[in-house]
Image: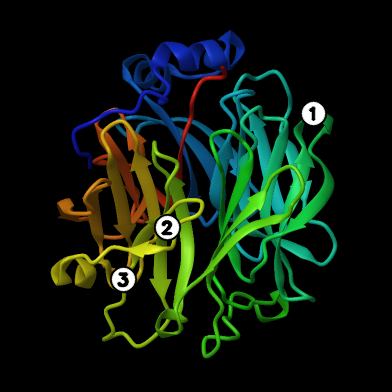
Amino acid sequence: MATTGSHSALVDRRAFLRMAGAAWVATLDARQSFALSRTDAVFASGYMERDGSFGIAVLAEDGTIIDRTALPARSHGMAFSPATGHLVAFARRPGTFALVTDRTGETEPVTIAAAEDRHFFGHGCFSPDGRLLYASENDFEANRGVIGLYDARDGYRRIGEYSTYGIGTHDLSVSDDGRLLIAANGGIETHPDFGRTKLNLDHMEPSLALIAAATGTLVERHTLPETLRQLSTRHIDLDDRGRIWFACQYEGPRNDLPPLVGHFGKGEDLTFLTLPEETTLGLANYVGAIAVNRREGLVGLTSPNGGRFVVLDAGSGRVVSQEDIADAAGIATAPRGFAVSSYDGRFAGRRENVAWDQHIASLKPPR
């Protein structure tokens, strides 16, 4: 499941082995070692076993599972720090745990418990130097999104929080220089007393916010026009120009065809892409994940609802390719375009006896 291309930041096998260390490699069986010896890139994704248990897996480029770590419940998104080799799996909303594993094998796993009156929204990111972990969280009693701040040098102790200046915060990212945090505020009110029920679909408040990483001060906040109030801004990624690409999920009438993807930069208005009607129909008003291949200037989208994988040209916004993939779930930049997973166990064309979750992380070597 890939298009032509590569990404200079992707880990190669030798770099991953240097990061992982001999102790971790020694735990692999013959099949896993063989897969690792032949792969050009390494990924991680959450999964569900056929017996209903959950975990995260490290995978080779061809989809072979190299390593597994058990989880207490279902995960969603992940964050990886190339500076430290730490990988974090965040619980699916309204979960209250995040599990940190050290791909260098130097430290034991750490479980982060959500603060009182908070739960995780399923996403987060590291500061470029790996010293801070930022997590999207819900202050559910006050109905506001927050960014939890965790000190990676002190056992991931929670040291504070910032407002996201919105509600229903989902994805979270950071600028390459570490100065700006980017929050995708989906605009949907939820409360753990009601599980995953969406409580305000008739008066949603989607927005995208730029926040100063050093202080938590609001830099910019972009709200959607009134005609798109039911368009939930969910997932984001950055291109090589620093533009923020965002992907949306529509909560309005099924026969509407709103724009589902766009981009903006600091000081710029939101720009929505007008995709061909066939492409929009294929995405079924739901983009589940987005990834940017910076080197090749490509943007990849997946829709489990539509069973569609779409690749766009980042410069022109035109559709480069589209492919039907049943239950298309996660997407990440790969040495040859994009790696795509599915809920029915496929990853880059290989099927394992698990159900992959909605997101994939590329594991990059520490600097």
Name the disc covering residue 246, or none: 2
| Residue beneath the point at 23% across and 49% down | 311
Residue 142 visible to an observer of this rendering:
yes
Query: As rendered, which of 297 and 126 lies closer to the eye?
Result: 297
Tag 3 and tag 1, C-beta contact below 8 Å = no
Disc sitting over residue 153 in the figure: 1
SS at badge 1: helix
Residue 259 numbered tag: 3
- The residue mark sitting in front, 3 or 1, is 3
Locate residue 28 relative to residue 85 in the image: left or right. Answer: left
140 or 277, which lies in front?
Answer: 277
Instruction: Give the camera-side residue of 5 and 74.
Output: 5
Disc 2 crowd rating (10 Å Cα; few below 14, some 14-19, many 20+) is: many
* The quarter of the displayed image where residue 83 is located: top right
Residue 100's place in the image compared with 355, above or below, is above
Q: Which quadrant is home to the C terminus?
A: top right
Q: For the residue marked with disc 2, what is the amino acid?
A: Phe
Residue depicted at 73% across the width and 23% down the height: 107
- Which residue is rendered at x = 44% and y = 78% of the image? 225
Helix, strand or loop at mark 3:
loop
